[in-house]
Image (cartoon, helix red, strand yellow):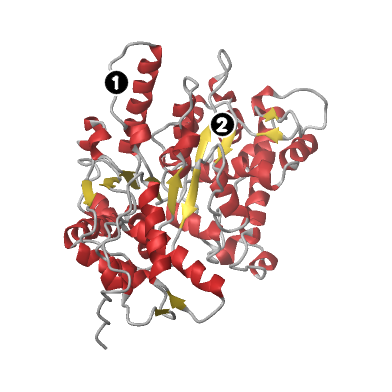
Amino acid sequence: MNIDSKKVTKDLEDNLDESLENSVCPDTNAPNLQHAFAYIEKVFRIRCNLHFKKDTASEAETLPQLAYYGDQSAFSRFIEKHQPTFDEYVVLLLALTPHLRPNFLDCLIKDILPATGEFPEIGGTRDNATRVFIPTGETAVFLLAGDDLDRRFEVQQLFTGEHWFAQKNILRLAPAKEGEPLLSGRLFLNRDYIELFTLGRISAPTFSADFPAQEISTELNWDDLVLSDEVLAHIDDIKGWIEHNSVLLNDLGMAKKIKPGYRALFHGSPGTGKTLTATLLGKYTDLKVFRVDLSTVVSKYIGETEKNLAALFDRAKTREWILFFDEADALFGKRTNVKDSHDRYANQEVSYLLQRVEEFDGLIILASNMKANMDQAFLRRFNAIIRFPFPKEAERVVIWRKSFPDNIEFEKGLYLPEMLGRFELAGGSIINVVHYACLKMLARGQERIILLDDVLQGIRREVEKEGKVFKNVVSERKTPGSLPES
C-alpha cells in the first residue's frame, strides 16, 4: 500500500457520511474525531492485512480522500491553520489515541490479528499502571510505510527538530533508551493540544513544579499608572513589537536576520510600577502574563535549576505569553570567578538561562531593583532597558490622588494628596498607606472620612519597613493643604 502524502482536504459532500454531516456542531470536536478514527481504523486494517496476511487485495484497495468538517471547531481551525499532510495527520491522531480512546489500538489489533503472539513490527509500549497500548515512532512508520525503507525514512522526518511539530511544540518522539531502536520512544502530544482536541480550548497552566509561574492580572488601567514620558515611550516600543512582530519576521523576511522574541529589563526602586506595567501590557494586548517564582526555579542541587527552567520554557514556547521574572538578579546576576565546583555549576546555570532567554519567541520582562547586579552578558542582549525612576513630588501627588477611593472625604479643611506628595514614597508604598488609612476609617464605623493622623501612621509604618527614621514633613493641624479647584 503506497499512501501519497497529500494535504488533508475538506470535502464534506463526497467523503463524509450524511449522518455525521448532520451532527456537526462548532462547540465540539467529536464529529471530526469520529470520522478521523474511522479513517485510521481503515488504514490500520489495510496495513495489517497486507503485512501479516499478505492480502494482495489490500494492496489494490484505495483509501477515500481524507476530509474534515469545516465547522469552526477547535480541531477544524487547527487543521485549517497548519494544513498537515496525510502522514502528519495520521501521526497526530496516533499520539492522541491513548488520551481519547485508550483501548482503540488494542481492540483493533486483536480483531485483525486474533492469534496470540507478539508483533514487534507494530511497535508500541505499555503504561506500567494502566497497561494501555502507547504508540511509538515504530507504530507510525509501520502504519504509514510498512517495510518500504524510503517511506520509513520519509516518515521519520516528522520527528526531527526541524519539523513544525517540534518547532511549534506540538508533538515529539521520546528519546529511545540507551541501546534500544531509535524509533522505540513513545509519541508525546503536548498536553495543551490534548486539551484543544478534546475540550476545544487550552486552559492556562496552574502553578506546579513543572510550571513554576503564576498568571497575574489587574483591574487597573493605563490611566491608573503614573510614569514619565520617557518610560511611556519605551513601553510604546514594546507594544509596537507585539503588534507588528509577525509581519516583521514573515512579510519582511527578517526571521533569518534577527533573534526571535523580545527581551526587556525593567529596573528601578521597589514600588515604581514595574510589575503593574508588565501586567497592563498583557491586559491591553490580550496576552497572558506569568510571573516566574524564582524561589521554585533555583535549586541547590546540581542540574535541577536547568531542568526547572527547561520545563518552564518548553511549556511557554509558541504560546505568545509574557514571562515576567521579578527580582531577576537573583538568577540573572553576575557570573562569578570559578573557585570551586559550586561556582562552575552556578555559571553553567546562568549560561543555560541566557541561551533559553535568547531562544524564546515571546516577550520576556526581567525586573530588578539594581541594574548594577545584572550580568553584562545579559544586558547586551536586551532589546530594551527601561529605568523606572523614583517619582518626583508632582508625580507623587498624582499617585496619591489616584490611590484614594472616589467615594470618601478627607478630614475637614485638608486636601491630603497635595500635602502628602512631600513624603518620598513610591507608588507601591502609597497604595499600602491608603489601604491602611481606609481600614482605620472603616473600623471607626462612622462617616467615610480619611484622617490625617491615620495616613501619617501608615506612612510611618512604610518608612520604618525600610529601616529609615520617620520624619513628619507636614504640619498636622496648623498648615492645611489647599482644596482642589472644582
Say which residue label 1 marks: 336
Instruction: Determine the secondary structure under disc 1.
Output: loop
Instruction: Determine the secondary structure under disc 2.
Output: helix
What residue is drawn where x is 27% and y is 88%? Answer: 486
Estimate the x, y position of residue 83 in percent, counting from the top left: 44, 52
Q: Is residue 451 left or right of residue 51?
A: left
Query: Residue furthest toward the left?
Result: 230
Q: Is residue 481 visible?
A: yes
Residue type, label 1: Thr
Residues tagged 1 and 2 counted as in contact (Cβ below 8 A): no
Separation (CA) of disc 1 from disc 2? 49 Å
Say which residue label 2 marks: 141
Query: Residue furthest toward the front?
Result: 478
Residue type, label 2: Val
Quarter of the image for residue 421 reads bottom left
Say if 447 sits above or below 360 in the image: below
Question: Which tag, 1 or 2, sits closer to the chain's start?
Answer: 2
Q: Nearer the viewer, residue 210 or 278?
A: 278
Q: Nearer the viewer, residue 9 or 234?
A: 234
What residue is drawn where x is 47% and y is 46%? Answer: 85
Q: Is residue 481 left or right of residue 160?
A: left
Residue 364 is marked as none
Q: Is residue 434 left or right of residue 201?
A: left
Estimate the x, y position of residue 467 in percent, counting from the top left: 36, 44
